[in-house]
């Protein structure tokens, strides 16, 4: 599944291995600017070293390019201690990972890194859709008298169709559902089983709704607990759900439908559609299909998250006066068409398809913007505190205010008009 990445050293302009070892034996500081087994070594006492090939260096760093399914672990690199003494600490930090989530386990949780010992560096990799990224790592090994610092990169291909990782997609109707209705001033404690649920008027469920079929809540009806359904869930006309909503199908919240009460999350296997007047505060949002709104005339404020980010397997399409705010990354497996007021994140914006920002719309991203496709900016405000990476073309229209604090990288062509 993984292969070793072979590295070669340029023969001119670098420091020879023999010269380097001589410098080290004298107790000096060595900085090697070419791609080798180490970048910087600090010693506090003289010592004798034999000259070795690169693959037998003092701290051997074996790199692996990997292909992995989202949410599983891989061995990214393997370290071998070629020193005559042990290292007491070893750290590996992710400098950048593109559109991947890379969680590196502590390489040396206990004990020491002994001479000739091999130390695998394990990481869990997650992604929103299939993508290949270069992951840059900072490696530091430190002992009583030695310290080695190195920066290396590996290429990781992550396979992850969002719908495959959404637990809600395991829910589906049985085909044998009967209707359970709560209307007028009626109330019930819970509803569970093979039902399609209909609530209207002042109808109320005091607890959870857990059914195999659909849930349709209208008027001033209310569900105080969580909703789990295999079919379509619809909230409209002021209907309220106090807890989380999990559906194996689609979710539509329109005409004043709300979430409220306890901290709530949205997990939707298919599409999530927000209508006029919807203003939702959630802990997290996971959508397997398209996330969109119908507020094209300035109605509706959109949604916000308070604990985690927003993950969309399909497209993200918003217009009108909507505001979408996320405390973490926004990950989109399709394209983004943003014609709304503002998309604001406290993390990265990661888009597998294209990104189109319409006239008068705004992106305010407190992190990187990484788009595998093309980016089109049409007379709007476009802000990123990190890098902008574009896999296709970058087109900037007249009147656009583009403010990127980091590096702009465009694989295709760049143009403005």
Image (spheres, rainbow, N blue to C red):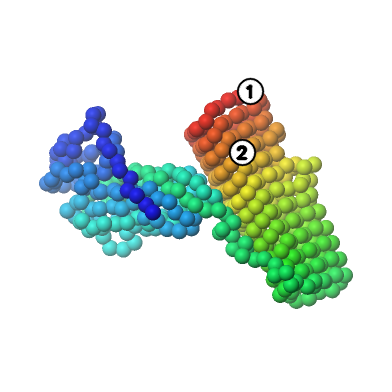
Is residue 110 visible in the rendered image? The answer is yes
In the image, what residue occupies the spot 15% across and 38% down?
18
- List the single residue furthest toward the front: 175
Look at mark 1 in the image and give the residue it sits on.
Answer: 417
Secondary structure type for disc 1: loop
**Is the residue 212 above or below the residue 414 in the image?**
below
Q: Which mark is residue 73?
A: none
Q: Position of residue 329 (x, y in %)?
A: 56, 49
207 relative to 22, above or below: below
Quadrant the C terminus occupies? top right
Q: In the figure, residue 219 lies in which quadrant? A: bottom right
The residue beneath circle 2 is: 355
Q: CA distance from mark 1 to mark 2?
A: 18 Å
Residue 224: give x, y in percent of width and height: 73, 69
Q: Residue, x 81% and y 67% (percent of image)?
A: 199
- Residue drawn at the location 86% of the way across and 72% of the way down: 185
Measured from the top left, where is residue 297 in percent x and y?
Answer: 80, 41
Q: Is residue 93 left or right of residue 45?
A: right
Place residue 402 in its image quadrant.
Answer: top right
Q: Residue at x 26, y 36 (%)?
A: 9
Give residue 296's position: percent from left, percent from top. Answer: 77, 42
For the residues labelled 1 and 2, say whether their Cβ atoms are less than 8 Å apart: no
215, 349: nearer the viewer: 215
Q: Residue furthest right?
A: 184
């Amino acid at each position: 599944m993984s292969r070793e990445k072979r590295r070669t050293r340029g023969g001119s302009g670098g420091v020879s291995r023999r010269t380097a070892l001589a410098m080290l034996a004298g107790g000096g500081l060595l900085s090697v600017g070419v791609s080798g087994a180490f970048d910087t070594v600090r010693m506090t006492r003289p010592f004798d070293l034999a000259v070795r090939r690169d693959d037998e260096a003092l701290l051997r760093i074996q790199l692996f390019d990997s292909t992995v399914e989202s949410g599983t672990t891989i061995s990214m690199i393997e370290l071998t201690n070629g020193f005559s003494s042990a290292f007491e600490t070893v750290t590996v930090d992710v400098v950048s990972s593109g559109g991947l989530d890379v969680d590196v386990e502590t390489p040396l949780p206990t004990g020491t890194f002994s001479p000739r010992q091999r130390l695998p560096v394990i990481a869990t990799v997650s992604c929103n859709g299939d993508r290949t990224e270069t992951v840059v790592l900072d490696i530091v090994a430190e002992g009583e008298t030695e310290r080695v610092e190195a920066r290396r990169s590996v290429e990781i291909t992550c396979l992850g169709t969002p719908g495959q990782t959404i637990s809600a997609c395991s829910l589906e109707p049985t085909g044998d559902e009967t209707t359970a209705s709560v209307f007028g001033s009626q109330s019930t404690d819970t509803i569970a089983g093979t039902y399609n649920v209909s609530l209207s008027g002042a109808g109320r469920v005091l607890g959870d709704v857990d059914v195999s079929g659909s849930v349709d809540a209208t008027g001033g009806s209310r569900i105080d607990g969580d909703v789990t359904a295999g079919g379509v869930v619809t909230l409209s006309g002021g209907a309220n759900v106090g807890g989380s909503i999990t559906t194996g199908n689609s979710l539509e919240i329109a005409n004043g439908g709300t979430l409220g009460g306890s901290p709530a999350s949205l997990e939707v296997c298919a599409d999530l559609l927000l209508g006029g007047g919807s203003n939702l505060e959630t802990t997290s949002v996971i959508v397997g299909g398209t996330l969109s709104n119908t507020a094209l005339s300035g109605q509706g404020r959109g949604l916000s998250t308070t604990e985690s980010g927003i993950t969309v397997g399909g497209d993200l399409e918003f217009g009108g006066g909507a505001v979408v705010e996320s405390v973490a990354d926004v990950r989109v497996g399709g394209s983004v068409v943003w014609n709304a007021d503002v998309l604001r994140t406290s993390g990265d914006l990661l888009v597998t398809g294209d990104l189109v920002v319409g006239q008068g719309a705004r992106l305010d991203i407190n992190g990187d913007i990484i788009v595998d496709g093309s980016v089109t900016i049409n007379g709007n405000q476009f802000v990123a505190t990190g890098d902008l990476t574009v896999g296709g073309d970058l087109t900037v229209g007249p009147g656009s205010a583009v403010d990127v604090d980091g590096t702009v990288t465009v694989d295709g062509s760049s143009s403005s008009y």
